[in-house]
Image: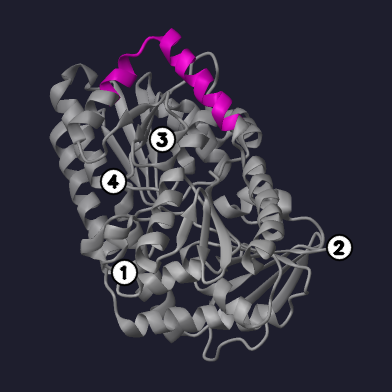
Amino acid sequence: MARVVIVSNRVPIPKARGASAGGLAVALRDLLHPGTVWFGWSGRLASEPSAQPALVEARGVTYATIDLTSEDYRGFYIGFANGALWPLLHFRIGLMRFHREDYEGYLSVNSSFADSLGAVLQPDDTVWAHDYHLIPFGRMLRERGFHGPLGFFLHIPFAPPSMMEALPVARELIADLCAYDLVGFQTEEHARDFRDCAQRMLGATVQGEWVRLNGRSMRAFACPIGIDAESFSRDADRAVSDKVVQRLAGSLTGRALAIGVDRMDYSKGLPQRFEAYARLLEKHPEHHRKIHLLQICPRSREEVDEYRKLRSELDRLAGRINGRFSEFDWTPLRYSTRAAPRTTLAGLYRTARVGVVTPLRDGMNLVAKEFVAAQGDEDPGVLILSQFAGAAHELTEALIVNPFDPDAIADAMHLALSMPAPERRERHLALKEKVFRTTAHAYSQHFMEALGQVKAQSVPRAAA
């Protein structure tokens, strides 16, 4: 049988008690059947790069990983992927740091991936690569003689030509994406921006979702990612007995809970969210002593200056808000940089009256979908959602806000806290139907079906 080979920057190797949690692992769960291979970086740094991948088998799935050197990690991961591509694709050009040697490191690691995987690929394998770390990977795999179906999915946003042109190697990266048979994006806006880049920057011919360049055709389309909504809803039901959830619920003493859950990143709009909460308490003193905002933001990429600065700013804002508004028996803002288990998060979402998901720019944002899936039908909470999250294209019954406007977020929080139950239920049921329809299963099935169709069509088109 033909194998599916998943390629990603990090590989979620199963632990003794089951597979590691994580958005990508959940999204691709339906593909993890016997015979599947998942290949990528082990997460370990070594004095010498791996010549051959290390193999771990679990439940018939082979997890193949290679180590990187510290120098590779700095150039590939910190330098180019997260120092240049991440800020650019999140519309933060002022934070983009491009160094030619970082780009060379990025290419070198992608080349190592192609070398290591190419040595074990079979001719009838189907390869699906994921995210911005691996844009050149497809071209390099082709150069090593792989001719099977080759797909790519970008989990973060894309940028229009006027912004992409700021990156000195943008044309090379656009051409690299065109080496795949199929490239998926979270929204049609992101797919359209890529097609516009291919047309304007490379002179490609674009017809609908098809891009033709240098004698071959590929397809760029929208394929929004989802969650396992049924499972997450069951987690929320079970979490009633979770000790952390019980302690939190007990500590509320009848007050409403607003919750935000984000990795600590400058794309998530966290300072603006804290400022919005302060504005809510300023403009609507009737909410004093009646609400807590719980912000969970696990630390990440602390070796990058911008992330350390962000944490210092959030510490300062949290202290200022609590210093100004708190009373002896009321702390308005609860702020934690510790990660929480999946089941605990589901229970916290179920407890919350308001979910605040206000990134400045996001590919999809699965927290929004998790919040909806966790709510009870009889007394659901209200989702506040940034217009610049990919999820806003689907979840139109949320309170949609501009995340750059703290007053707009504050007004939405006030509306959510005062919204009558019938309206909350009506909005929730509409959102729930969408979240339970565009699931992780639907996402992976849609992409793999499209990849099979595209490969069949692209061969005769390229030969025409």
Q: Nearer the viewer, mark 4 or mark 2?
A: 2
Q: Marks 3/2: CA distance?
A: 39 Å
**Of the residues under marks 3 and 4, which one precedes in the sequence?**
4
Amino acid type indicated by mark 3:
Ala
Residue shown at 23% from the left, 24% from the top: 411
Residue receiving disc 4: 269
Q: Are marks 4 and 2 in contact (CB under 8 Å)?
A: no
Amino acid type indicated by mark 2:
Met
> Which disc is residue 330 wearing?
none
User: Can residue 60 be seen by looking at this rendering?
Assistant: yes
Amino acid type indicated by mark 4:
Gly
As helix, strand or loop, the secondary structure at mark 3 comes to helix
Residue receiving disc 2: 1
Q: Nearer the viewer, residue 417 or 184?
A: 184
Q: Nearer the viewer, mark 3 or mark 1?
A: 3
As helix, strand or loop, the secondary structure at mark 4 comes to loop
Residue receiving disc 1: 304
Q: Residues within 10 Å of mark 3 (few under 14, many from 20)?
A: many
Q: Marks 4/2: CA distance?
A: 46 Å
**Of the residues under marks 2 and 1, which one precedes in the sequence?**
2
The part of the chain drawn in magenta is: 413-436
> Which disc is residue 392 wearing?
3
Residue shown at 55% from the left, 50% from the top: 23
As helix, strand or loop, the secondary structure at mark 1 comes to loop
**Of the residues under marks 3 and 1, which one precedes in the sequence?**
1
As helix, strand or loop, the secondary structure at mark 2 comes to loop
On screen, 160 above or below 294?
Answer: below
Q: Position of residue 274 (x, y in %)?
A: 24, 40
Amino acid type indicated by mark 1:
Val
- The quadrant in which residue 197 appears is bottom left
